[in-house]
Image (cartoon, grey):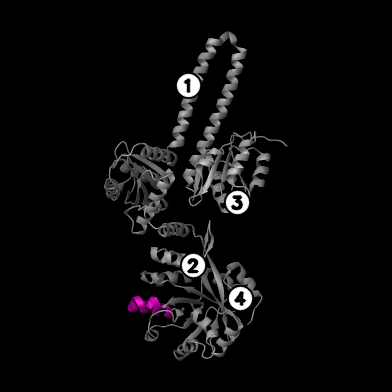
Amino acid sequence: MNYEHLDSDKKDILIIDDMADNLRILSSILTRDGYNVRKALNWQMALTATQTLLPDLILLDIMMPEVDGYEICQTFKAWELTADIPVIFISALDDVFDKVKAFRVGGVDYITKPFEFQEVLVRVQNQLALRSARLEILKLNVELEHRVKQRTCELEKTLQKLQQEITSRHKLQNKLLDIALHDSLTRLPNRVLFIRRLENALNRTQQESSYQFAVLFLDCDRFKVVNDSLGHPVGDELLLAIAHRLQGCLIPIDTLARLGGDEFGIILDNITDINIAIKVAERILQQLSLAFKLSRYEVFMNASIGISWGNKNYDRPEYLLRDADTAMHRSKAQGRGKYHVFNPGMHQKAIQLLELENDLRRAVERQEFLVYYQPIISLTTGKISGFEALVRWQHPIRGLVYPGEFIPVAEETGLINPINTWVLQSACHQLSIWQHYPVTPEPLTISVNLSAKLFSQPNLVEQIDRIIYENQLNPAYLELEITETVIMENTDAIKIILQQLKQRKIKLIMDDFGTGYSSLSYLHNFPFDALKIDQSFVKRMQENKENMGLVPAMVGIANSMGMSVIAEGVETQEQLAQLRSLNCNFAQGYLFSKPIEQQLVLKLLATAPQW
């Protein structure tokens, strides 16, 4: 088998990652920057790819099936042909990533997910430059050795030239080291150098009992809006201005670093009290609140800051930075333009909640959500009459997360609004697609839950109008499910919104009827088309067979008010027979089908099931 490198100057990069999305993103970034990129999903593919053509650089994911990233790296370093190829590890922020082990087995650097495009390119460029330098040095050494053997008569001249080349090599090495430890845009220390200085500070706390320091983690609020609207050159100019303003708030012994994107880290060195760090944070927030007069624009910017107190209880500098990051996200959740001091005594559950908030914010940005659809059955015909849209979170590490775990956090943080709007848009779009297929019954409805938080938005009806218009959907096929808590909060304002939706022929359903605290008088004041009986009442029918619990009363209330009834959580044939005997109109539950992915809906409809 032949092993060779490409003859052209185009560098070859091999990406080893079992996540296709990661491969696609990295490949796109690097290909666009002029690199030849090859991809491998597992160790066997990576080995084949390396045997076919030796790459100039390897990007290697830690979390790999069967053979993890550490073992793959160790194997490459043990193989003579690949021993000198630089390996950059890839790790998600949440991964248990042992950096000491990564460098021990031969890794030269690491990149964290989610990817910061510029950071990826700079790290790749740095390592390729270092490798080129090493190859050049090897080449020079061979040439020097040959010259010594061939030109013994010119020994003095050769030694003089050798010294010049060694000096040049040292300059090159120092230049590359500087590039590897500093941000290419701001020339500030980068994350690698920042972690080293954090480690030095922690070591000093072990040696000097009086020495104390603090870490500030700063994230710019709304920077992405500026970058997306005014362009990356303006974004770069703003980052330089922010870095300059931050330096003005510090003294020379402090460390300011750009950690990536719009995130900055600060080490306040040799301070005596946490209040000093708080005063610095307040001064920074005040300075960043002033307008930035750029070359073509005037931009306003603020930031969220997390503060952690450095002490000898920390084993690793990464943990200290993590706690500052956690505090920063807590300050962001409390309102932008604030600071928060990390409390080491926080309960572990609170930490887990912060991590969930972190993940959820990123999930909203990356649209990591899926819509599953559960069929709603007409008890008159026994056939599918519609589907309820149910959101799921496709977490990149934990897999499928159900709404009971993340919806309460989304409600608390305000993230429920973009999630809910996205689900509504996705469900309406999907229904508009299904309606073009002959297997789809007419009419087929889509039912979407609306959070109470959405009703605080002044443009809710306009948003729904836009979604219906964009998807060319008949509003009569759209059903919106609303809990009793919605109509309890601000009845006059909610009543107006519901009446506007009713005027558009949209069906309104009171969800989880019977579980709230509203009185029946509320039903007379709001234009609901149907009541949905909570599954807890359906389950109790079998426990109380004589009068079937409260379900007959609920059906009677709905019938007396001209409303339909939907029973959820139907799991047995006996429950189905009981509901039919009560003249319940619709039902859904595992007896018919669990919630399914959108690609399975047409297959289900094609079978024309009937119960």
Which residue bears the numbered disc 3?
A: 18
Q: With respect to residue 152, does 5 lie above or below?
A: below
Residue 517 percent across, percent down from the top left: 38, 80
Q: CA distance from mark 2 to mark 3?
A: 27 Å
Highlighted magenta segment, given as a residue range: 484-503
Q: Is residue 269 magenta?
A: no
Which residue bears the numbered disc 4?
A: 440
Quadrant for the N terminus, please.
top right
Direction from residue 581 to residue 210 in the image, left or right: left
Dot in front, 2 or 4 = 2
What residue appears at the point 42 percent right and 49 percent down from the top-left corner? Answer: 322
Q: With respect to residue 278, does 566 lie above or below?
A: below
Q: Earlier in the sequence, mark 2 or mark 3?
A: 3
Q: CA distance from mark 3 to mark 1?
A: 44 Å
Q: CA distance from mark 2 to mark 4?
A: 28 Å
Which residue bears the numbered disc 1?
A: 167
Task: Give SS at disc 2.
Answer: helix
Dot in front, 3 or 1 = 3
Query: Foreground residue, 541 or 37?
Result: 541
Direction from residue 24 to residue 351 in the image, left or right: left
